């Protein structure tokens, strides 16, 4: 931790949005993969929807990442050394490892997406359908979910492993918070898309509610721990625009309200909230996940 | 053998010849003015220009790679007081946060131990900025890249010293082999101590794995605006990674608990229906 450390000047509309979309994509992907692995075929609705979300959402991120660079056309230096042309990785740099993880995850998300299209008969190019099925979908779901967890978490690690006071003092918690938030925003995205695709068998939605209850509790615990850890530098989370984003947006609307509504419905014995309520809560979770990332990113640069 | 600089702040006279020499050798333009409307006077003011101190750079930036810090400690009535002056730049740490963070290999350590920033490789991701505990590396909007002191990479690889050391009229900035410079620093520290300047200390023997550019201060490092215990952020990486993985495992377990047990109870329900 060092107050002298320079702020990087990362823009919320590039890096903040990138953190969010990468989190939703990766969160959806690993929930989809877990459903694929352990659902015993009962959760095809979840895993298919997850794979439909993961890749298109991920496609939004490269322009955001490249846009924030001072020399956008040199983005390929992240993967290949500019002078030698050989693949380059710096294992002590979360950004370098993250770039490669993004390539790996992108490839797996693409394959799962393709798999969906073939299985659902939206692509009927036979030779292709044959070739892709040589690798069982569980292989890329496995590799992709590990890479997905990495994508969801490394953005927080990247902030933690710096000398900026807020980010350094909240080390090692932001990575974990972003993973957990990726889980809940991913689940919310799956829920909304399932609703939109009109697949909603009741037991699956019940399971979403249950999952949401668990991750929201972890998320609140991590938020409390982060504010305590920030100590005297937590002040930036209590003043100005980013304080409103953090407390009203991320904590209240994004976490406490959805959790309260979930618990209320649960205690009254309804396993499910009414559909409009559940839909609204899913939107709030997504909004909260976005504001959580923007506020922590920007407050750390004040 | 690593080369570096020993900055004896006790004999710095604040002439800023080092700042000028640095700008000339490295062809660095003047600092662009950052005009903002002053809330009181309602006129545009260049907020990055000091005007209230002999310190005219205020920070190390993409165009100011050297900064002569003036620590002006005077009481209101101007009776007594003191002036501390220290010429500050990149410290070329042996465990450099910027170098550890660089995702492209633009930051390199050369055979002489200095940390250089290759301008043709840098993509301007700005990750080195928050990774330097000293606030040295800065982003230049003119070049779209990060920039900092290179210890005059091209000069020292051709048998010359750094431009700032060459220009220094008092010998406050000395360039040379780090081992030799340390002997010089120790001797100077012993001399100051014998003169009764008990707070004198050398900054940079232990910090960040040892600094190739180190300082002799007359007071605590924080008085000179340097962090007392600078931390190389990447040393925390194993712990951060472990906790993040634990977070991932927690989400995984949550998903399994939520999606599995409920499924079993559903099956139970089906049996009852039958």
Image: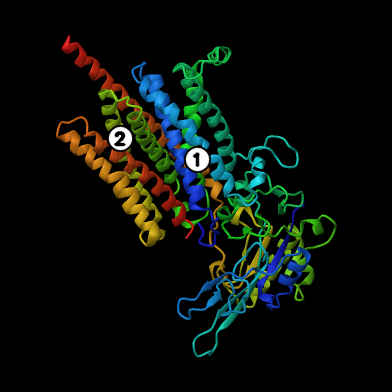
User: In this picture, is A88 found above or below A69?
Assistant: above
Report the residue that reaches farthest toward the right. Answer: B159
Q: Residue at x 34, y 50 (%)?
A: A249
User: In this picture, is A114 found above or below A103?
Assistant: above
Q: Quarter of the image holding residue B44?
A: bottom right
Q: Residue at x 73, y 69 (%)?
A: B173
Q: Circle 1 sits on which residue?
A: A154
Q: Circle 2 sits on which residue?
A: A212
Marks 2/1: CA distance? 22 Å
Query: Disc 2 vs disc 1: Cβ atoms closer than 8 Å?
Result: no
Q: Nearer the viewer, residue A302 or A114?
A: A114
Image side of residue B120 versus residue B44, left or right = right
Secondary structure beneath dot 2 equals helix
* Residue A80 spot, x, y in % from top left: 68, 37
* Other-residue count near label 1 (Cα within 10 Å), few / some / many at <14 / 14–19 / ≥20: many
Image side of residue A83 versus residue A185, left or right = right
Q: Quarter of the image holding residue B164?
A: bottom right
Secondary structure beneath dot 1 equals helix
């Amino acid at each position: 931790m060092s107050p002298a450390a320079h702020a990087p000047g990362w823009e919320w509309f590039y890096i903040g949005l990138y953190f969010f979309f990468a989190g939703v994509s990766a969160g959806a992907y690993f929930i989809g993969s877990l459903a694929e692995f352990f659902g015993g075929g009962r959760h095809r609705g979840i895993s298919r929807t997850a794979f439909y979300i993961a890749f298109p959402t991920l496609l939004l991120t490269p322009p955001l990442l490249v846009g924030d660079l001072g020399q956008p056309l040199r983005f390929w230096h992240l993967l290949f050394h500019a002078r030698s042309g050989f693949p380059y990785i710096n294992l002590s740099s979360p950004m370098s490892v993250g770039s490669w993880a993004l390539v790996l995850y992108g490839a797996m998300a693409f394959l799962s997406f393709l798999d969906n299209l073939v299985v659902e008969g939206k692509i009927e190019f036979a030779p292709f359908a044959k070739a892709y099925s040589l690798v069982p979908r569980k292989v890329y779901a496995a590799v992709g979910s590990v890479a997905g967890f990495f994508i969801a978490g490394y953005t927080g690690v990247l902030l933690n492993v710096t000398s900026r006071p807020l980010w350094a003092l909240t080390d090692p918690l932001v990575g974990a918070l972003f993973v957990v938030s990726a889980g809940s925003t991913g689940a919310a995205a799956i829920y909304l898309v399932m609703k939109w695709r009109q697949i909603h068998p009741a037991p699956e939605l019940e399971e979403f509610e249950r999952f949401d209850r668990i991750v929201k509790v972890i998320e609140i615990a991590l938020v409390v721990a982060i504010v305590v850890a920030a100590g005297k530098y937590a002040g930036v989370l209590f003043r100005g625009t980013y304080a409103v984003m953090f407390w009203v947006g991320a904590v209240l609307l994004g976490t406490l309200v959805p959790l309260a509504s979930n618990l209320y419905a649960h205690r009254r014995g309804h396993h499910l909230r009414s559909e409009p309520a559940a839909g609204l809560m899913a939107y709030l979770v997504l909004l909260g996940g976005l504001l959580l990332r923007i506020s922590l990113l920007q407050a750390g640069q004040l | 053998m690593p080369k570096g600089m020993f900055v004896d702040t006790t004999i710095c006279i604040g002439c800023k010849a080092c700042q000028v020499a640095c700008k000339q050798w490295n062809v660095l333009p003047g600092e662009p003015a950052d005009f903002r409307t002053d809330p009181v006077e309602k006129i545009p003011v260049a907020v990055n220009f000091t005007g209230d101190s002999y310190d005219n750079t205020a920070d190390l930036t993409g165009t100011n790679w050297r900064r002569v810090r003036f620590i002006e400690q005077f009481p209101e009535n101007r009776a007594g007081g003191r002036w501390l002056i220290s010429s500050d730049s990149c410290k070329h740490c042996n465990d450099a946060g910027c170098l550890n963070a660089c995702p492209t290999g633009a930051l390199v350590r050369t055979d002489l131990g200095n940390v250089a920033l290759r301008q043709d490789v840098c993509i301007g991701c700005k990750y080195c900025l928050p990774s330097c505990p000293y606030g040295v590396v800065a982003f230049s909007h003119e070049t779209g890249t990060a920039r900092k002191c290179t210890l005059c990479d091209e000069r020292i690889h051709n048998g010359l010293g750094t431009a700032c050391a060459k220009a220094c009229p008092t010998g406050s900035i000395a360039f040379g082999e780090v081992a030799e410079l340390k002997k010089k620093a120790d001797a100077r520290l012993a001399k100051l101590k014998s003169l009764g300047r008990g707070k004198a200390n050398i900054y940079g023997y232990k910090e960040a794995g040892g600094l190739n550019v180190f300082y002799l201060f007359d007071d605590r490092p924080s008085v000179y605006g340097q962090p007392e215990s600078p931390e190389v952020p990447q040393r925390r990486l194993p712990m951060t990674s472990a906790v993040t993985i634990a977070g991932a495992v927690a989400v995984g377990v949550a998903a399994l608990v939520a999606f599995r047990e409920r499924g079993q109870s559903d099956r139970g329900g089906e049996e009852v229906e039958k």
